[in-house]
Amino acid sequence: MKLLHLDSSALGTQSVTRELSAAIVARWQDAVPDVNVEYRDLDIDPLPHLTGRSLAKADSAEAEAAEATLQQFLDADVVVIGAPFYNFSIPSTLKAWIDRVAVAGRTFRYTEAGPEGLAGGKRVIIASGRGGLYGDTSPADFQEAYLRQVFGFLGVTELEIVRAEGVAYSPQHRADAMAAAHASIRSPLAQAA
Ligand SMILES: Cc1cc2nc3c(=O)[nH]c(=O)nc-3n(C[C@H](O)[C@H](O)[C@H](O)COP(=O)(O)O)c2cc1C
């Protein structure tokens, strides 16, 4: 079993999502001893913005790195993503990664019946960190809602969110939110909602 672990927080050791994504991956390692974990820190090792030159494959080194990124996603059975809420959305480093894995003909295609996701059969677990309180349905949420939309579009039907929110309200809010988030991490052997 292959697990791809991504982090994208810019807050280093103070990061909520790094702590949660690491805890989720540790649970998988405990439950599935032969799990093969590949890790990428998108904050330290970001992908370039997708540009016209990228689409034209003008830079062969960039095209090679993009293909490796896409293949790593396709190969993963489980993808754990540390995804902070920045400026009502996700960090641009995580968006840059999504731009390399949302590829027509590889992870989705359009048919006469509409779009079809081609990257199903994997589990995606989002470690979500939010300074404010948004819940499940806020119109200001372009983070979790966006990630649900993108991965659903790619064919992922098993997406789970582990969320700590309101962490900027006070140290107590943060501690309580983190305790609740840790407690909400599901057994790797359970099915996603
Ligand atoms: C650049 C930046 C932008 C942020 N924008 C928002 C925001 O729009 N709304 C919000 O509620 N919190 C915002 N926050 C707070 C983060 O959501 C919060 O710090 C959360 O813990 C981020 O996850 P992380 O600790 O893993 O980086 C922002 C934080 C940073 C550093």
Image (cartoon, grey):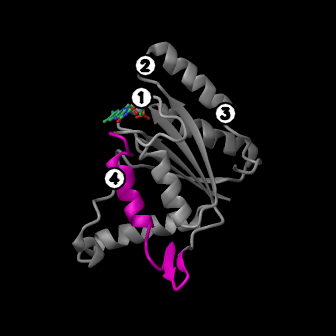
User: Which of pointers 2 and 3 indicates the residue nearer the eye?
Assistant: 2
Gap in angstroms between the C-alphas marked 1 and 4: 23 Å
- Say the numbered circle drawn on residue 46: 4
Residue ID for mark 1:
131
Q: Is the CB atom of the residue marked by disc 1 within 8 angstroms of ligand 1's nearest atom?
A: yes
Along the horizontal axis of the image, is 1 left or right of 124? right
Question: Where residue 60 sits: x, y (%)?
Answer: 28, 75
Residue at position x 37%, y 54% from top?
95
Q: Are marks 1 and 4 in contact (CB under 8 Å)?
A: no
Gap in angstroms between the C-alphas marked 2 and 3: 21 Å
Gap in angstroms between the C-alphas marked 4 and 3: 29 Å
Tell me which label, 4 or 2, sits earlier in the chain. 4
Check disc 3 and give the amino acid type: Ser
Along the horizontal axis of the image, is 44 left or right of 152? left
Tell me the crowding category of disc 1: few under 14, some 14 to 19, or many 20 or more residues within 10 angstroms, Cα based.
some
Q: Secondary structure at mark 2?
A: loop
Residue 121 lies in quadrant: bottom right
Along the horizontal axis of the image, is 30 left or right of 85? right
Tell me which label, 1 or 4, sits earlier in the chain. 4
Residue closer to the observer: 164 or 133: 133
Gap in angstroms between the C-alphas marked 4 and 2: 30 Å
Residue ID for mark 2:
169
User: Which of pointers 4 and 2 indicates the residue nearer the eye?
Assistant: 2
Q: Secondary structure at mark 3?
A: helix
Residue 140 lies in quadrant: top left
Residue ID for mark 3:
184
Q: Are marks 1 and 2 in contact (CB under 8 Å)?
A: yes
Vertical arrangement, residue 125 with respect to residue 50, above or below? above
Question: Where residue 69 sits: x, y (%)?
Answer: 44, 64
